[in-house]
Image (cartoon, grey):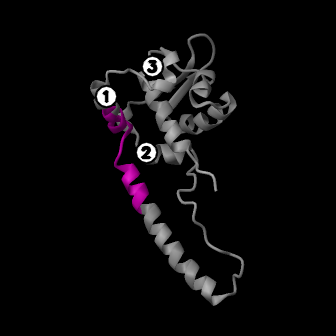
Amino acid sequence: MARDSRLSRMLHVLLHIDQAERGLTSDEIGRMLDTNPVVIRRTMAGLREQGYVTSEKGHGGGWKLARPLDQFTLRDVYAAIGEPPIFALGLAEDHAQCLVEQAVNARLDDALGQARQLLLDQFAKVTLADLSADFHVRLAAHGERRCNAHREER
């Protein structure tokens, strides 16, 4: 199963938007993430619907933050992008009447549910301002403004 990196990628984008002096277009974000601007618009739409970003068309437009970074968490962003699966593990459903499969699935489902809830509780404790603060510590230590991959944006 392929890894779903939407959460990481959107957090990355939101921090770049925060650092930008203007809105970032879907084309710019698409180049940053090496993906199609249509994918960016589709993903950012969930963030816009939840009130985390705004978008403006035309010259000087683009994606901008709609609220300060301390007003939304990793969990909020996770929910806004559609709550992608956290685990690649899944339950077997080949033999639903098999009592062994039922016992295995019951325990796995319980353990995975508890692990998911623990992770989501941790996500709820981390604001985007916390991520930004970590970025600024790294910036001070390394003296670079942006990711090496995004240097051309300057």
Task: Say the numbered circle drawn on residue 16.
Answer: none
The residue under label 3 is 20
Sequence-earlier tag: 1 or 2: 2
Query: Magenta residues: mostly which secondary structure?
Result: helix
What residue lies at 40% left-to-right and 43% top-to-bottom? 73
Q: What residue would you read off at disc 1?
A: 136
Kind of residue at badge 2: Leu
The residue lying at 38 percent from left, 50 percent from top is 124
| Image quadrant occupied by the N terminus | bottom right
Image spot of residue 153 (x, y percent): 51, 17
Q: What secondary structure is found at the residue carrying circle 1?
A: helix
Q: Residue at x 53, y 27 (%)?
A: 54
- Report helix, strand or loop for mark 3: loop
3D distance between C-alphas at marks 3 and 1: 14 Å
For the record, the magenta segment spans 118-134
Kind of residue sitting beneath label 1: His
Task: Give the crowd class for mark 1: few <14, some 14-19, many >=20 residues within 10 Å.
Answer: some
Instruction: Identify the residue under disc 2.
Output: 74
